[in-house]
Amino acid sequence: MLIMMTAFIMDLEQCRIPVQQFTDVDKNKFLQEIYPLRKPVVLKGLDLGVCKTRWTVDYLSKIGGDHEVKIHVSEMPQMDFIKKNFIYRTLPFNKFVHRAAENKHNEYFISEDEKYYLRSLGEDPRKDIADIGNQFPRLAADIQIPQFFDKDQFFSSVFRISSPGLQLWTHYDVMDNLLIQVSGKKRVVLYSPRDAPYLYLAGDKSEVLDVDNPDLDKYPLFSQARRYECLLEAGDVLFIPALWFHNTVAEEFGVGVNVFWKHLPSECYDKTDTYGNKDPTAASRAVQILDRALKTLEELPEEYKDFYARKMVLRIQTKAYSSKLE
C-alpha cells in the first residue's frame, strides 16, 4: 500500500501542468492570441486601479461599513457544497472582515479555528445578480476591471473574501470569467472539461473534496485527471474558460473579484440563473431526454438494458464528442 501511495504521489507531481503566464496583455492580444485557445492563463501586470494598495483590512472595514452580509462559516478548512459542512450566518461587514483576517478567533460561531467565506449576492439572490458596482459602490470605484469583453456581454462581478487556509470545492461555471486576485495569495487547481469522467460529478461539483490527497479507493479514476495549477499573487488575473473545473485555496487572507460574461448568445442561458452556474438550456433539455431514455430502458431485462445502454454510450461518443478539442 505504501509503495502504491508513493507511486501515486510521484505521478501526481509529474502530472501538475503549470498554467501559462502572460504579461503586457491588452484586449487585442487577449482576444486574438489567448482567448481562442480556450485554456486557463494567468495575466500579470494589468492595471487594476488603486485597489491593490488600498484594500487593507482597515480600509475595507471602513469603506464597507456595518451593513450586514451573509457568509459561509465552516469548522473545516475544506468547504464541501455537496455535503454542506458549513453554516450560513450574518455579520456586519466591518466585523466580518476583521474576523476573516484572523487565524484564531476570540469571537466565533462554531470554534476559534472556523473559516469564513463571503460571496457577494444581489439584493434579491433569486432575481438579482451580484455586481460590485451595486453592492459595494465605493469599493468598485477603486478597481479597474480589464475590458476584455463587450459591455453587453457582462453578466456579474462577484466580490469575494476568504479566510487564510480556506479551500473551496471543485466546480465549473457555464460562463467565461476573470478571477482578479486583489490581495493575498491563492492556489488554484484546474481540470479540463474533457476530464469530467474522472471527477465524480454531482451536478456542477466534484465529489472529490481533497484534490491533494484524494481517496483513490473511493475515487479510483481521479488519478487520470490532468491537473493544471497556478499560484496567484496580489494583482494577478486568472482567465478561467467556461466549463473548466477549478478548486481554490487561500494561502493567505484574500480579497478578489470574479467577473463573468456571456460568451454565448443570451438565449442559450437559463434566464433564472443569477449565479452563472446553471447549465445552458439546450444542455438541460438533453439531460432530461437522456434521463427519460434511461428510465425507459428499465422496462427491459438486465441483459438487454446493459446492451442498449452501451449502444447509447457509443452513439453519444460517435455523434457528440469533438475530436478537435485537446
Image (cartoon, rainbow, N blue to C red):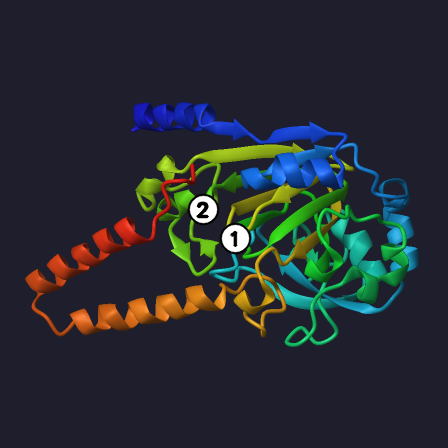
> Which label belongs to residue 193?
2
What residue does disc 1 label?
172
Label 2 crowd bin: few (<14), some (14–19), many (20+), radius 10 Å: some
Label 2 sits on what residue type? Answer: Pro
Q: Contact, CB < 8 Å: mark 1 with mark 2?
A: yes
Front-most of residues 16 and 94: 16
Front-most of residues 131 and 213: 131
> Which label belongs to residue 29?
none
Name the image quarter holding the C terminus: top left
The residue under the point 40% across, 48% down is 196
Q: CA distance from mark 1 to mark 2?
A: 9 Å
Mark 1 or 2, nearer chain start: 1
Label 1 sits on what residue type? Answer: Tyr
Q: Is residue 252 above or below residue 64?
A: above
**Residue 6 in view here:** yes
Label 1 crowd bin: few (<14), some (14–19), many (20+), radius 10 Å: many
Q: Is residue 42 above or below residue 320?
A: above
Front-most of residues 63 and 26: 26
Q: Position of residue 166 (x, y in %)?
A: 63, 47
Q: Secondary structure at mark 1?
A: loop
Front-most of residues 202 and 22: 22
Q: Position of residue 8 (x, y in %)?
A: 37, 28
